[in-house]
Image (cartoon, grey):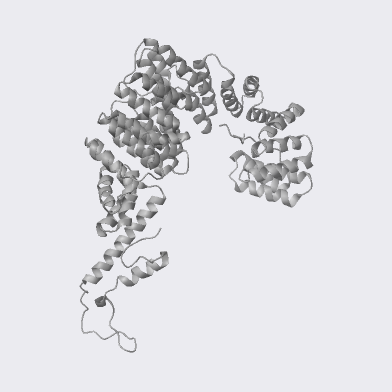
Amino acid sequence: MNMAIKGGISLPGLRAAGATGLCCLLLSGCLGENDRIASSGSGAPAATAGPVEPAVPTVRTMASMQIASAAGKYLAGRHARQHRDFGAAAEHFSGALQLESENRKIRREAFRSMIAGGRMEEAAALARQIVKDNEGAAIPNLSIVIEDALAGKLAEAEARLKTVPRRGMNTFAVPLLLAWFQAGQEKFDDAVKSLEPLEKVASFSALRHLHLGLIRELSGNTAAAEENLAKAAEASRSLRVIQAYGGFLERNGRGPEAKLLYENFERENAGTVAFQSALARLDRGEKPGPFLRSYRDGLAEVFFNLAGTLAQGRTSELGLIYGRLALRLRPDFPLAQVLLAGLLAALDRGQDAVALYRAVSPDSHLYQSAQLRLASLLDDLKRTDEAIALLRLLSEKDRQWHEPLVRLGDLLRSEKKFEEASNIYSAAMKRIGDLSENHWSLFYARGISYERSDRWPLAEKDFLKALELSPDQPFVLNYLGYSWVDKGMHLDRARKMIETAVSKRPNDGYIVDSLGWVHYRLGNYKDAVEQLERAVVLRPEDPVINDHLGDAYWRVGRLLEARFQWKRALSLDPEKDQIPLIQKKLNQGLAAASKKDRRG
């Protein structure tokens, strides 16, 4: 069934050149005095005696060629950067910089591409050159202070941070980082004072309290730490804040409170498994280690928090840079690995994202989530066999965990392996045991698999069970209603079901198509045309909907338009068994063909 489950260049001599001008300048600039053909007044070539010796490049020629080469590498870097291929961009910009070593613009581009691509040491070397010309350059300064942190140069980093202008994200980043560098020097009172500017920003209240709490716990001020962490949890129900506060409670012998905190989070966020390992730890009577091991982890936490904030807006590349900085400080940071992988995948850098998901430690509470995301990404990259193999392996490793089986069923169904998919869904249900209303989608998915493998009685039973668990689900109402219409069964009930589905999802072209089709099957051809025309507007690329509209047009006497829609349906890659039926209608008219179409 057709429905969803689920800039310019600053090089010497080229500063004013646009794209066309650049080409002209490169072409003329590559010819030196000795490269041009000597000419007579008439314009005819001068006579030569014997073979012409190759011209020896002059200094001017070589300089022109160097400019051209630098320009080409720069433009190649810009192209790679636009396509988010930061590795290739860094290579091209670095090549251009070797030829134009004093060009500040190229240096800045090379720096940003290197840091976005994870080449942190090379980026830091360029950063030191950049800040010589621009002391307030934000990201280069942050790159340098991280290298200072890794080298244990805390005082130097603190001094540098105090000179960085507090603009944009630095309004928040600088106080947080400064506080952690001071904490690393055991200047805890100074660290608390450094965070005072964030009091004025209500939206950063939770972040300020989180870092205050973590710094105070590191200093041994347990009472003040609890106060701050509790306020952070009150202001934000984010995973990271709950982890920090819950871990603090556990370490201080307050396991029952931590358990309640975790259970409330899982209840508020249905389907999460983030605290399964923590709850198991509580059952064993064990306590977790420190939330942060040192000030360096605190610095990494700052960059992770800011990367997460930036990732939610239209600043994903800056979020990527902050994520890289977090991992530079703490390479074994699972949350940063998963966040960065998600950003890379969103930027169409799937191969880089795969490597990050695979780097998440099996000991991490995020391992299972990372593996599921990896499977989904492999499928997106057309490596479906690898995704299937991974999901099978995950389901075998943990025979109590049902989610890999659900994902495997979905994947097999997308591959049209419907019988195998239905068996996998059944195995997932068996692992779950007590099925609740949250599991309606499992019955729905298995019902589709049954229907597509010609086991209608089982499919109908699952659809009805899904509606019993969640009566107003528009997808189930539509699929079951459409199936009944297609089989000529329960037409009035099917129409009411589909009308309910349309009222809940009025802009879903597939569901609107179903309503048009039920009108068609009931003989209400005028109403069918009205609904199917709207469905085609909503889903113009769908062959089934276009085919349906052709049928409806034929029934109301609009024969030319009917044939146009059938031709369009053929051009949209319909299912193979529908092609001869549509062709027959084109050749002989509607009465000559009977058809059964499916969606999915």
Q: Is residue 75 visible?
A: yes
| Image position of 478 with respect to 560: above or below | above
Q: Position of residue 514 (x, y in %)?
A: 69, 35
**Residue at 27%, 66% in the rendered image:** 65
Image quadrant of residue 379? top left
| Image position of 392 with respect to 147: above or below | above
335 vs 182, nearest the viewer: 182
Q: Give the quadrant of the C terminus.
A: top right
Image quadrant of residue 336? top left
Image quadrant of residue 223? top left
Q: Position of residue 19 (x, y in %)?
A: 41, 64
480 vs 13, nearest the viewer: 13
Q: Position of residue 128 (x, y in %)?
A: 25, 48
**Residue at 47%, 44% in the rendered image:** 314
Q: Report the number of discs.
A: 0
148 vs 119, nearest the viewer: 148
| Image position of 58 with respect to 272: above or below | below
Q: Is residue 349 visible?
A: no
| Image position of 130 with respect to 509: above or below | below
Q: Please give left or right for residue 477 compared with residue 264 in the image.
A: right
Q: Position of residue 95 (x, y in %)?
A: 28, 55
Q: Give the quadrant of the N terminus.
A: top right
